[in-house]
Amino acid sequence: MRNNSLAVATVVAISVALTACTANPTTPAPSEVLPSVSPTPHQTARETSAPPIASVEPSAPRETAGEHEVEPDPAAPLKDDAIDVAALAASTFLRAYGRADLSAKDWFAGIQGLLTPSSAEAYAYSDPATIPPFEISGDPLLVEGSTIQHARFDVATSTGTYRVILFRPAEKWLVDRAVPPGGVE
């Protein structure tokens, strides 16, 4: 009898939790509010790794629909202008990251403003002398599956391809991490 009561209580608790997770029926779906976005003509690299890491940062910038501000769909693909800005953020970071000739203090000062807060904490203790010297040898290639909040670029260098992972918690793209050639995302 006790097992049956426990099973019923578990089912009720799960049902209540799932009901609380459903969307408010008066809230329009993002597709009802935002225009659809078609794929961009930019080159993409075939996705070969794990799914995107969920962002714990605030949401992407809001868009307007008429007089009302609406929350953009975080899974929406990047538009051309956003791809260019994100690619510039990726290559700017990688150039600063590769400055192994600097002291740790100067190196970190050069990348700190380009990083998410949690990444800045992690990179603060890195020693740039351990980074093999490299030169960027190609334009950043957008990785398939990138969105308006989360983008990944493969950047060819003289030592191999780095993957630069970025988040856009507000107006500015910030780097979450750079995965070195042969590294695991």
Image (cartoon, rainbow, N blue to C red):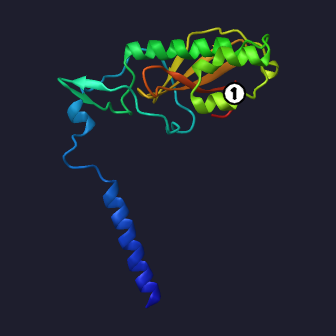
Residue 51 lies, in percent from the top left, at 51, 38
Name the residue rendered at 72%, 11% in the picture. 158
Q: Nearer the viewer, residue 78 or 65?
A: 65
Query: Residue 126 occupies which quadrant of the picture?
Result: top right
Name the residue rendered at 46%, 13% in the picture. 85
Per the image, the residue denoted by label 1 is 123
Query: Residue 122 occupies which quadrant of the picture?
Result: top right
Element marked by disc 1: helix
In this rendering, position of residue 129 left or right of residue 156: right
Query: What amino acid is labelled 1 in the image?
Result: Tyr
Say if 167 sits above or below 50 in the image: above
Residue 90 lies, in percent from the top left, at 56, 17
Q: Nearer the viewer, residue 66 or 139?
A: 66
Q: Residues within 10 Å of mark 1 (few under 14, many from 20)?
A: some
Say if 24 sits above or below 170 in the image: below
In this rendering, position of residue 158 left or right of residue 15: right
Residue that protrudes farthest toward the right in the picture: 129
The number of discs equals 1
Q: Nearer the viewer, residue 146 or 29?
A: 29
Residue 102 lies, in percent from the top left, at 78, 11
Question: Can the viewer see residue 41?
Answer: no
Image quarter in which the N terminus is found: bottom left
Image quarter in which the C terminus is found: top right
Question: Can the viewer see residue 114?
Answer: yes
Residue 77 lies, in percent from the top left, at 38, 26
Name the residue rendered at 56%, 33% in the picture. 48
